[in-house]
Image (spheres, grey):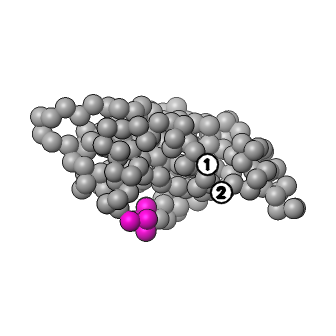
Amino acid sequence: MASRWSRIFKHRWLDEADTRRALPGESLRRLAEHVAASERQHTGEIRIYVEAGLPLGYLWRGASPRERAIAMFGKLGTWDTEQNNGVLIYLLLADRAIEVVADRGLSRHVPPEQWRQITRSMADAFAAGRFEEGLVQAIDAVGAELVRHFPAAPGAANPNELPDEPALG
């Protein structure tokens, strides 16, 4: 029970100001540009969601960062792409947790271990407080998988189905 209260306190201690310190406006702009540049190379959609702490309901029931990432995948409409190839890169500052959630169109081609490898490579940058750098690494790694399995065809329409800007919680 003490660990539950400790986790609740840690998550309630951090707020949106901590998220903005981790990723100030210029970082958000550069990340959005990096997502847009990646998406010109493939037909997938990449979303980024960063939040300081979990909502109280998630904390009270002991939910994992993965559970929240899957919920945000749906809430942000990342699943709602023509080829079911949306990907959410999720960062939870309080738990220093990183999750990558891919829609079924892409996940059938990329094994879970590959996604875990991407999150492990991001962890060093995040541990050092280099959030933008870690997210750029993640965008590049996710983009490489999307290019491999869903390359953009030269001259074909490639609509931007989802916002490129990172969402903050």
Quadrant showing the N terminus? bottom right
The reply to whether residue 105 is visible in this rendering is yes
Question: In which quadrant of the rendered image does the C terminus lie?
Answer: top right
Q: Secondary structure at mark 2?
A: loop
Image marks 2 and 1: residues in contact by CB distance under 8 Å: yes
Asked whether, in this view, residue 130 is left or right of residue 137, the answer is right
| Residue at 56% in and 49% down | 69
Secondary structure predominantly adopted by residues drawn in magenta = helix
Mark 1 Cα-neighbour bin, 10 Å: few <14, some 14–19, many ≥20: some
Residue 159 vs residue 79, the one in the foreground: 79
Q: How many labels were placed on the picture? A: 2
> Quick check: is 112 in the magenta stretch?
yes
Which residue, given by chain and number where applicable, does mark 2 sit on? Answer: 64
Label 1 element class: helix
The region drawn magenta spans 111-115
Which residue: 30% across, 51% down?
Answer: 146
**Amino acid at pointer 1:** Arg
Q: Residue furthest right?
A: 2
Q: Identify whether 59 is placed above or below 162.
A: below
Q: Where's residue 123, x and y in %?
A: 53, 61
Q: Is residue 18 magenta?
A: no
Residue extending farthest to the left is 155
Relative to 130, say whether 14 is above or below: above
> Does residue 18 appear to the left or right of 107 in the view shown?
right
> Residue at horizontal 35%, vertical 44%?
84
Mark 1 lies on residue: 68
Residue 122 locus on image (x, y percent): 48, 59
